[in-house]
């Protein structure tokens, strides 16, 4: 070993020792803060968002802002766990993108519950079996997740946060030299098949595409049958012992799924927030225009407006809206107060930090 290499390693060792000391010092402070909390709430989404934004603003590299967020999310996860364990329900099985979203938001120091449906995620949190839930709400390529939108207006749960997860699909097969000729079926969730259809048309135009309940289920099937290939993420490949035959096969390289964090918690303002609501218009001319007027009048920007059939009657619709700002912000509060005067129905689904 050269003297220069030895010197660098000694410097890294000293830095590691200092990092360990500082992490434990941070953990002790977090424990003290936990003792001072009177409401017993461990997770403060607004505070964690402020911490991550400040660190990213101060980041001088060479670590990327995404790497900084991932690193300190894990630090906060371990510190949170010293106060009390947090349980999070998500759409399973293990190895899905929903699980990746859980880890991205909460880190590894949590108790995760893989459920069989979006409905079950809501039930876990509503019953107190889990502190929070993670549900997909929309994909940049395939649009809204209808079941999540249908459940939000009828549930007492609040939206406590959002996660934007880049989705990079892989083609997974059993380990081997060649796959041409032996792959007779490609199995995946219908949305994954749709997000990769151009790539599949070029590379496997004559292979049957079989929709299954989840990409993880597809990976499990491929692990037991060499004639099947699965579309899933790298995590599923490691979980089921499959070989990644091709990386990033999604047709849109910007393919992203947005997930919501749901819980029984009102989230305070973080300084860069979003408010989600659902509303319905009265049955009269110009009613939809009147729904939007309060936002324009008070200078509140809409980032999403989507209609969906109402469960109340045939050909009746509700509108899902995301706006910039927290519901306690003066402009947002004024707009919402005016909206309630003209709308047939308004429900605030939650105010929460914009995804970091």
Image: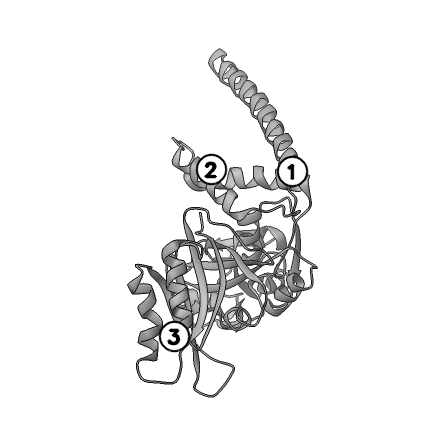
Is the residue 204 above or below the residue 61 in the image?
below
- Counting residues from the start of the chain, the first of labels 2 and 1 encountered is 1
| Picture coordinates of residue 329, whole percent (x, y) | 41, 53
Tell me the SS state at disc 2. Answer: helix
CA gap, disc 2 to disc 1?
28 Å
Is the residue 33 above or below the residue 256 in the image?
above
Residue 342 numbered mark, or none: 3
As rendered, which of 228 and 136 lies closer to the eye? 136
The residue under label 2 is 68
Tell me the SS state at disc 3. Answer: helix
CA gap, disc 1 to disc 3?
43 Å
CA gap, disc 2 to disc 3?
45 Å
Image point (41%, 75%), residue name: 343
> Which residue is most to the top?
3
Residue 36 numbered mark, or none: 1
Closer mark to the observer between disc 2 and disc 1:
1
- Counting residues from the start of the chain, the first of labels 1 and 3 encountered is 1
As rendered, which of 246 and 14 lies closer to the eye? 14
> Which residue is most to the bottom?
314
Tell me the SS state at disc 1. Answer: helix
Mark yes or no: residue 16 visible. Answer: yes
| Picture coordinates of residue 60, whole percent (x, y) | 38, 30
**Around disc 1, counting alpha carbons within 10 Å, would you say few (fewer than 14), some (14 to 19), or many (20 or more)?**
few
- Left or right, 255 with respect to 219, comes to left
Is the residue 141 above or below the residue 289 in the image?
above
| Picture coordinates of residue 195, whole percent (x, y) | 42, 65
Mark yes or no: residue 246 visible. Answer: no
**Around disc 2, counting alpha carbons within 10 Å, would you say few (fewer than 14), some (14 to 19), or many (20 or more)?**
some
- Counting residues from the start of the chain, the first of labels 2 and 3 encountered is 2
- Left or right, 159 with respect to 93, comes to left
As rendered, which of 284 and 34 lies closer to the eye? 284
């Amino acid at each position: 070993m050269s003297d220069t290499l030895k010197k660098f390693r000694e410097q890294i060792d000293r830095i590691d020792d200092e990092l360990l000391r500082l992490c434990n010092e941070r953990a002790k402070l977090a424990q003290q803060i936990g003792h001072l909390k009177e409401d017993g709430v461990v997770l403060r989404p607004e505070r964690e968002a402020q911490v991550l934004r400040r660190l990213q603003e101060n980041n001088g590299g060479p670590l990327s802002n995404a790497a900084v967020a991932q690193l300190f999310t894990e630090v906060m996860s371990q510190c949170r766990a010293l106060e009390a364990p947090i349980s999070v329900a998500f759409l399973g099985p293990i190895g899905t993108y929903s699980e990746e979203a859980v880890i991205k938001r909460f880190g590894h120091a949590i108790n995760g519950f893989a459920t069989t449906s979006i409905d079950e995620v809501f039930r876990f949190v509503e019953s107190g079996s889990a502190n929070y839930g993670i549900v997909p709400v929309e994909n940049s390529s395939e649009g809204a997740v209808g079941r999540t939108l249908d459940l939000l207006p009828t549930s007492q749960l609040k939206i406590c946060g959002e996660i934007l997860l880049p989705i990079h699909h892989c083609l997974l097969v059993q380990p081997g030299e060649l796959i041409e000729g032996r792959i007779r079926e490609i199995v995946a969730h219908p949305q994954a098949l749709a997000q990769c259809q151009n790539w599949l048309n070029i590379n496997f135009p004559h292979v049957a595409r079989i929709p299954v309940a989840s990409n993880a289920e597809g990976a499990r099937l491929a692990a037991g049958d060499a004639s099947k290939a699965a579309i899933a993420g790298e995590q599923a490949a490691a979980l089921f012992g499959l070989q990644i035959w091709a990386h990033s096969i999604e047709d849109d390289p910007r393919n992203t799924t947005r997930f919501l964090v749901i819980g029984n918690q009102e989230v305070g303002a973080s300084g860069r927030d979003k408010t989600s609501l659902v509303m319905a218009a009265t049955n009269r001319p110009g009613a939809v225009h009147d729904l939007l007027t309060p936002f324009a009048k008070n200078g509140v920007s809409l980032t999403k407006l989507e209609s969906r059939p109402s469960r109340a009657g045939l050909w009746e619709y509700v509108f899902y809206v995301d706006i910039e700002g927290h519901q306690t912000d003066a402009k947002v509060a004024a707009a919402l107060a005016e909206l309630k005067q003209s709308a047939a129905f308004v429900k605030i689904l939650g105010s929460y930090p914009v995804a970091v």
